[in-house]
Amino acid sequence: MELKLKDLRYLVAVADNRHFGRAAARCFVSQPTLSAQLKKLEQTLGVQLIERAPNNVSLTAAGEEIVARARRILEASEEVVTLARSQRDPLAGKLRVALLPTIGPYLLPQLAPAIRKSLPRLQLRLYEYQTAPMLEKLHGGELDVGILALPVELTGLEARELYREPFTVALPERHPLAAHDTLRVADLRGETLLLLEDGHCLRDQALEVCSRVGVRDSQDFRATSLETLRQMVATGAGVTLLPELAGRGAYRNARGVVLRPFAKPAPQRRIGALWRKSTARRPAIDALAKLITEHAL
C-alpha cells in the first residue's frame, strides 16, 4: 500500500474547508480531480473517510483520526524540504509569520524597512489571527512563527520574549482626565471601559488592569478592532486602553481622542515569538526576533 503526500493534502484541505470546491481551489486542482483522488484513497485504505451529502461535507470518525495523522505527516515532509533549503541559506526563502490584530498594523510599519535592509532574501508571508487559531495553525504546521502576547500554553512550542509594551489611556478630547500629563489606574475609577470582543487577549489584559478600581465594562458594546475602539472613544462613549505602539505614527493624532501614558510603573503586556520545537527555520526566526526587539519600541 502506497500513500501519496498529494492525496493527504487533498484530504486535509477537505477537512479544513468542508467543501470540495474550496478544497480543490486551495490545492490548485479541479474539483473532479480532487474528488476522484480521494475516492481512490478511500479504496486504497479500505475505509470511508468522507461523508458526502448535498451541501454538506463531513468526515467520518476514521476520517477525523486519519486527518490528524496526515497533518503530522505533511508537517514532517515540509520540515524536510525546509531543512534542506535552510542549510543552503538559512536567511532566505519563505517564512510564514502570524501576528495578533492588535500588533500587526502597528509593529509592521516600523519593522518593514529593517527587514528589507537586514534580511533581503527572506520572503515573509504575513497573516493575522487571534491567539487560539494562531496556536492551532502553529501546531498544525501552517505557520512558522507567531507574534503574540505572553504567556500562552507551550506544549510542543518554544517562546522568546521580544519586548514589553506599556498601555496608554485613550480619552475623549474634552474629558477631565485629558488635562493630566500622566494617569494612574485609580484615576479611571467609575469610568466606562470600552473593550474588544471576546477572543482578543487584549480584552482580558485591559480587564485585568482595571478590575481593581471598579471601572465599568460597557456591556452593550464590543469592538472588532482597536480602530473601532478609538472611534467610539471619540464619540464620548467611554475610555479604553491601547498598546503604546497603537498611539504612534499615523495613529498619534486621531481626531477627538487624546492619549495619556500611565505613571510608572505602567501596566504593560509581554510580546513574544512562538515556534514549534521541531522547526527547521530557527536561524530565520532568531534573526526576525532580534529585529523586532531592536525596532519595536
Image (tube, rainbow, N blue to C red):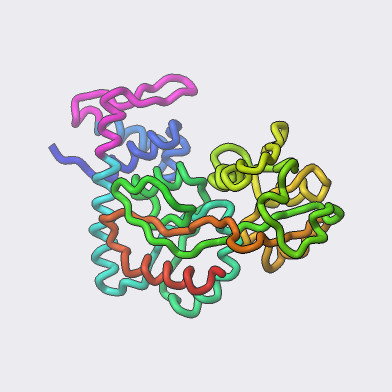
| Horizontal side, residue 228 vs residue 56: left or right | right
Where residue 258 sits: x, y (%)? 78, 59
What residue do we see at 44% from left, 47% from top? 134
Residue at horizontal 31%, vertical 46%? 155
Q: To which quarter of the image does residue 254 belong? A: bottom right
Specify whether 212 is left or right of 278: right
Closer to us: 261 or 237: 261
Which residue is nearer to you in this view: 22 or 292?
292
Q: Is residue 244 above or below residue 219?
A: below
Is residue 128 visible in the rendered structure shown here? yes
Q: Look at the picture and state if 95 lies above or below 202.
A: below
- 44 within the magenta span: yes
Farthest residue to the left: give it: 1
Question: Height in image: 40 above or below 130?
Answer: above
Q: Residue at x 26, y 73 (%)?
A: 88
In the picture provided, is 183 more to the left or to the right than 234?
left
Q: Quadrant of the C terminus?
A: bottom right
Residue 35 in percent (x, y) is at 36, 33
Q: Is residue 105 visible?
A: no
What residue span does the magenta drawing correspond to?
Answer: 42-69
> Of all residues shown, which one is farthest toward the right?
174
Q: Residue at x 83, y 46 (%)?
A: 235
- In the displayed image of the protein, which residue is found farthest to the bottom? 117
Quarter of the N terminus within the rendering:
top left
Q: On the picture, is 260 further left or further right than 244?
A: right
Residue 243 screen position, x and y as percent: 61, 57
In magenta segment, residue 48: yes
Count numbered badges in the picture: 0
Coordinates of residue 287 in the picture (x, y in percent) = 39, 71
